[in-house]
Amino acid sequence: MIKFKSFDELTNMVSGMPNRVIVPGANNEEVVEALEMGIENKIISGGILIGPKSDVENYLKTKNIPLDFFEIIDENDVEKMANIAVELIKDGRGDFLVKGLVDTKYYMKAILRKDIGAVKKEGLLSHFVLFKLDNYHKFFALTDAAIVIKPTLEEKIKIINNAVEIMRIIGVKTPKVSIVCPVEKPNPKIPSTIDAVELVNMNKEGKIQNCIIEGPYDIYITFSKKLAIEKGVKDGVVPGDVDIIILDDLDAANATYKAISFFGAGMSSATILAGAKFPVILPSRTDSPKTKLYSIAFASYLKQLNTSKMR
């Protein structure tokens, strides 16, 4: 069971922890506002901001952040910003990355550099967002909405394992996973449903462990036991109690992620990069400062738990 009931509670739990952030593309109002909120909530203790120095300083001034609170590296080239950021992490000068005004392609290209060593052995990096909505009774995760464009079956297994690992770290012992498809019956003309059957069978055979996988399910079945029964799905344990939803590809996942973010009742969220050796915050450039704040708090929480396990 997750040990926090809201992202505000999570933020309070990590308040006072020393967290040095590295921010490529810090010339961005939303990310600087998130930094201000992080400082106010005592979850950011310092760090390094990378971007055009005059622009970064102007944003800091508008938020009343002392110019000496962060070190600023003057850089105008977006790709160079991303590379400087990962090198600083590798050198131990920061605890985690916070994505600012940089394209995801440059951000990911830098993180994937072999000399940085961010990816776990035989692993895969994937986008992970943790949602809390007013009209759903618990946190749930969605993946992959930003990184893997058209995952193969093997890549879907790694995406599931990434998400399961994070959910287990935060307290969900056996996450319930829904393979979300347009329909609930396998159809050779809809490849996602065939993959769903394969993933369910692999889970039953013990090839994918530490979770319960069901599908193919549509969104209605996934989130409502009542609607699942109406659609003839009566024996599943995932409907209405899902912890992780797996979408077929970037087209489906990104649209679902942004639709929930924009329209979800009382939506709050945190987004990170799963499968990396160090915490990486990966919100959309247009995500709210609150989402960025909660992502920083979530990364801090994961860092704390991983550090405790290593002791």
Image: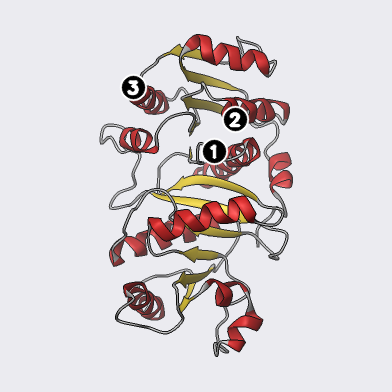
Quarter assignment of residue 112: top left
User: Within 10 Å of the Cα at label 2, are there few (<14), some (14-19), or many (20+) other Cα atoms?
Assistant: many
Using a 10 Å C-alpha cutoff, classify the residue at mark 3 as few (fewer than 14 neighbours), some (14 to 19) or many (20 or more): some
Q: Which mark is residue 30?
A: 2
Q: Nearer the viewer, residue 153 or 301?
A: 153
Q: Determine whether 241 is above or below 118 in the image.
A: below
Q: Nearer the observer, disc 3 or disc 2?
A: 2
Q: Which residue occupies 34% across, 76% down?
A: 190
Tell me which numbered mark, 2 or 1, is placed earlier along the sequence: 2
Which label sits on residue 33?
none
Q: Nearer the viewer, residue 80 or 220?
A: 220
Q: What's the amino acid at mark 2? A: Glu
Residue 168 appears in view = no
Residue beneath label 3, please? 80
Label 1 with label 3: CB-CB less than 8 Å: no
Q: Are marks 3 and 2 in contact (CB under 8 Å)?
A: no
Q: Is residue 125 above or below residue 38?
A: below
Q: Which mark is residue 286?
A: 1
| Helix, strand or loop for disc 2 | helix
Residue at x-position 60% and y-position 17%: 59
Q: Is residue 245 visible?
A: yes
Mark-to-mark CA distance, 1 and 3: 22 Å
Q: Quadrant of residue 239?
A: bottom right
At 69% from the left edge and 47% from the top edge, which residue is drawn? 7
